[in-house]
Image: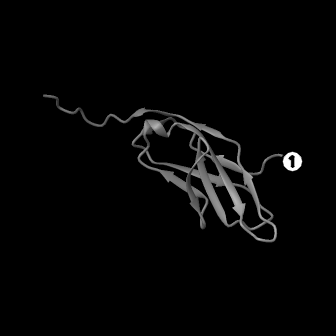
Amino acid sequence: PPDQLVLQVPVRALLGADTVTLRCRGWWNNPFTLVSFYREEKELGALRNGTKLSLSPLQMNHSGRYHCRVEAKSVVSPWWEDSEAVTVTVQGEHHTAATPTA
């Protein structure tokens, strides 16, 4: 069966200083207890209530491959599911106002 878990990211260009919300979306037959978000296999955060993680302010080093994981920590039948990885590219910094230089 096709993967039912999807990590949603905005499709517009991402610039430094933006706020971006990652959403882990899916359809589960079992209740889940934890949603975790990863960049390059490193855990960014885990949520017990909720499926969204905001990155703010974005920085160039936030570029990379992201995925989310849903898991149930049941003693009887623990399970987890990973989304496919999604590449996020931060294209540059916002240029707000010119900074005077000496």
Q: For the point 21% across and 33% down, which residue is it?
A: 99
Compared across the picture, whether 75 is left or right of 46 comes to right
Q: Would you identify the image quadrant in which residue 45 lies?
A: bottom right
Q: Which of 32 and 25 is in front in this view?
A: 32
Q: For the point 36% across and 36% down, which residue is it?
A: 94
Compared across the picture, whether 59 is left or right of 63 comes to left
Q: Would you identify the image quadrant in which residue 95 lies?
A: top left
Q: For the point 23% across and 32% down, which residue is it?
A: 98
Q: Is residue 44 above or below residue 87?
A: below
Q: Whole-percent x and y of residue 22?
A: 57, 50
Disc 1 packing (10 Å; few <14; some 14–19; many ≥20): few
**Which residue carries the number 1 mark?**
1
Q: Nearer the viewer, residue 40 or 93?
A: 40
Q: Whole-percent x and y of residue 14?
A: 48, 37
Compared across the picture, whether 7 is left or right of 4 comes to left
Q: Which of 66 and 73 is in front in this view?
A: 73
> Which colouring convention does the figure follow?
one colour
Q: What element carries label 1?
A: loop
Compared across the picture, whether 66 is left or right of 55 comes to right
The residue type indicated by label 1 comes to Pro
Q: Would you identify the image quadrant in which residue 25 lies?
A: bottom right
Q: Which residue lies furthest to the right in this view?
A: 1
Q: Whole-percent x and y of residue 82?
A: 72, 50
